[in-house]
Image (cartoon, helix red, strand yellow):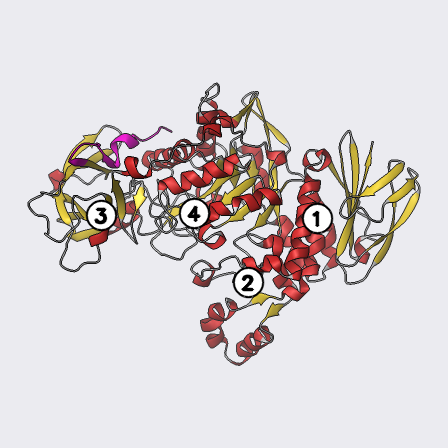
Amino acid sequence: MKRLPLDRLGARSRKTAPEVIDFDILLPWVYARDENRLFVKIIHENDQFIQDIQPMNFEMEQSEDPDYGALWSAEVEIDPDFPDRHPDSHWGEDGRYVYRYCLESPRTDPIDWIIDPFAREFGVGKLSAITKEYDRDYQHVWDGREVEWKTPPLEELVIYELMINEFGGSINDSIKRLDYLRDLGINCIEVMPVSNVSNTVDWGFLPIGYFGVDERFGKRCHMQKFIDAAHQRGIAVILDVVYGHASDLFAYSYLYDRLRYNENPFMGPFAKDYFGRSTDFNRDLTQDFFFTVNHHWLDVYHVDGFRYDCVPNYWDGPLGRGYASLVYETYQMVKSKMGSSDHWQRFFDGDSVNIIQCAEQLEGPREILRETYSNCTWQNETLDAVNHVSREEFDWLTALGFRLGLMDYPVEVEANGETIKKTAFQYLENHDHPRLVCSFGTLPDGLDLAANELRKRNEDLFKQWEEDIMVLKDGNRDLWYKVQPYLIGIFAAKGIPMLWQGQEFGENYFIPEKGMGRVVMFRPVRWDYFYDPAGKRMVSLVRRLIKMRRSSQFQRGGHMFYNDPGRYQSQGVLVFSREDERSFSLVALNFTDSDRTVEFQFPFSGDYREELHGLDNLEDVVAGAWRSFDLPSNYGRIWTVGV
């Protein structure tokens, strides 16, 4: 893979007076010799909704790029004295200009509203953008401490997944919440996609632009400020990126569909085809495009890594041209910066390369760790077991015990003479699924019963209204306490614990398993929950768990699941331990509504300190002797002793 020449693609200012902007776009196979004509249409952002003020229209010239084919270019002078300027327009003034491309081709009617795939800024909907005098008015100056920032190693991560506009309302308002996250104990944020999409309310998983921040969140400088501020608070930032598919409005899908070409230089079937329009990693342009996107976000925005969405869409095996190749090339590109004294130094700790490359490969999480340069992965196995246990299917406690220990997951992998540490995320909630409290009951009362009754009476009508009905539900927060043993479990477990925004104080939105109501419904974090009784108690527990998590046995120690169905699982209890050369911790969880008394043979003698409250300490424990202890309902205990 190689980087595309971004200094010669997209819209770029020459920083002259009057200002001249260069526009360049790669459109393989679209040649002027075939009577194609391409235009760029530009208008000041303040004029775009004024009926009498139309965009300026500039014809582009086509040349040949030696690697990718047809390259279309134009230079536009943003001069207030331009002869075709409308007298009431803002043309020539400072500010943001929105633009699009339009192709006239003998194959079809004019194709308008082609977004620039190399745009660094975006306007509303299907508009690309560039800001006149951006460097003067908006250039971000990085904190001097940025060159001292170090991306944390995997084993130390405590991750908080968020969507910027739901978490804080805007990037600037989200910055104000960073002190809260630091105080909570978070040291890594996973940001849902900020890439450009066509809708104002959207999760961001059908991109139409990749090289910048969607206008609904803010400008490039705002995102840089967010990451800078996070780093200065000891918080890494990884970005959720979508490379296996795109929107059908993405330029290389939208344009070539309308030209009715038999092939596409960028899009097409490749691996699985789950969502959107698949990207074809057999094409050099596709490979190089997304490799360049990764470099751009690492270099310009200083992100600490990526969470790669829907890996099956571009997974063609460990030696393929898709996902495995992209994460390998990204790793090698970062590794080539070793010895740098600038912002790239953040990834290096001795010989370790600490870029975070997290796969969402739910179909083969172990395989993706063993066979690629991904060092971590999402996995839904723990969540699946949790959902069964939450329905009082306690025979699933055995599966949950093994999954909290990441059974059969690699801890490190040798690759080309390097040892790369590996692990998986542990979560109870994420953006894709309902809040866990929804498993115990939902509100308003009777909605589920009414939906089931509708299904019995009229299946077709139920299917028509199901998605609209389900988005109206919330989890019953009166049952918040039932979540506690699961929270204790994931923070004591092997792997990287992750919270989804607001989970720490009992956010309770329901997410339908299918339908557009999942992705186009705005669900702002309800910060008032932080102050109510349930929220206060949950936050207090999460703070203690994150503090406990910093102990070495939980970050780096071994995991032992005590699989004894007769003694533990049959009572709704799960018991496991974490141990390193300095400490042993026993974790006992009670998932039932009744207190339980169980017994255990502790491997070490001594006085055991209870980690969650400092109460119910176990004194004078004798190694190898059975010792009984009590477990409160819907809760747990963690006892630790030095070894």
Residue at the spot of label 4? 171
Is 8 one of the magenta-colored residues? yes
Residue at the spot of label 2? 510
The residue at the point 28 percent across, 35 percent down is 136
* Label 2, label 4: how far apart the Cα atoms are: 25 Å
Q: Is residue 441 left or right of residue 28?
A: right
Q: Quadrant of residue 119?
A: top left
Residue contact between numbered discs 4 and 1, judged by CB atoms under 8 Å: no
In the image, is residue 369 above or below residue 172?
above
In the image, is residue 75 above or below residue 471?
above
Residue at the spot of label 3? 100
Tell me which numbered mark, 4 or 1, is placed earlier along the sequence.
4
Name the amino acid type tagged 1.
Gly
Q: Is residue 583 left or right of residue 243?
A: right
Q: Position of residue 19 (x, y in %)?
A: 18, 36
Tell me which numbered mark, 2 or 3, is placed earlier along the sequence.
3
Q: Residues within 10 Å of mark 4 (few under 14, many from 20)?
A: many
Of tags 2 and 4, which is closer to the observer?
4
- Depth order, front residue of 642/229: 229
SS at mark 1 in the image: helix
* Label 4, label 1: how far apart the Cα atoms are: 32 Å
Highlighted magenta segment, given as a residue range: 1-20
Tell me which numbered mark, 2 or 1, is placed earlier along the sequence.
1
